Image (cartoon, rainbow, N blue to C red):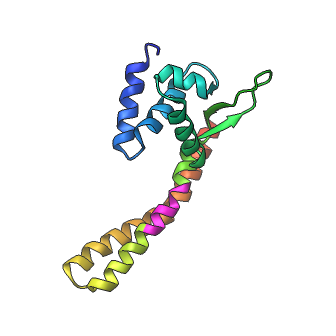
Amino acid sequence: MTATSDPAERLALVLAEGGLQRMTARVLAALLFTEQETMTAGEIAEALTISSGSVSTALKSLTGIGLIERVPAPGSRREHFRIREGAWATLMSNQNAVVTVMRDAAEQGIAATGPDSPAGRRLAEMRDFYDYLWREMPALIERWRADRAGSR
């Protein structure tokens, strides 16, 4: 890899600690740190010295959550990948499903433990937090997009 391999590997570790599979985190870091506009699966495998199967699994995962995309490469028969424009806002938008699941789980917990119990009060704070995220996340993402569009 390049001189940026240490920061890329550190980022991959942080992403893995945050819940991403280790190889998926490494592939994402490689795509973030590359000086190329796009990379093929083979280039990623070579840069990271990992198997093509690991790269393929990681690319499917990253494509599925909306962080990367396949792009046409004139004159090439291989698939090329890059980080999607607006990937981070898309990822957070997709997290709304997680927010709903967490909020619903808290609500079910409150129903099971009672709202006035110690557990019910803790779960109410969790529910209220996820309610707040649900209400605020779309506006926050739109403000970010507007700020980003204004700075270009």
Position of residue 124 measured from the top left corner of the image (x, y, whole percent): 32, 75
The C terminus - image quarter: top right
Asked if residue 115 shows in the view, the reply is no
- Outermost residue toward the top in this view: 3
Position of residue 74 measured from the top left corner of the image (x, y, whole percent): 79, 24
Q: Which of 77 and 73 is in front in this view?
A: 77
Kindly indicate the quadrant of the structure image that contains residue 116. Answer: bottom left
Q: Is residue 83 magenta?
A: no
Q: Main secondary structure of the magenta part?
A: helix
- Outermost residue toward the left in this view: 118
Q: What stretch is highlighted in magenta?
A: 94-101
Q: Nearer the viewer, residue 82 or 127?
A: 82
Up the image or down, 102 lies above or below 118; here it is above
Image-based side of 132 in relation to 36, left or right: left
Image-based side of 53 in relation to 85, left or right: left
Residue shown at 55% from the left, 56% from the top: 94
Q: Which of 15 and 135 is in front in this view?
A: 15
Position of residue 149 measured from the top left corner of the image (x, y, whole percent): 64, 39
Q: Nearer the viewer, residue 115 or 40?
A: 40
Kindly indicate the quadrant of the structure image that contains residue 5. Answer: top left
Residue shown at 43% from the left, 74% from the top: 104
Numbered marks: total:
0
Asked if residue 136 shows in the view, the reply is yes
Up the image or down, 75 lies above or below 119; here it is above
Position of residue 97 measured from the top left corner of the image (x, y, whole percent): 52, 63
Residue shown at 37% from the left, 66% from the top: 129
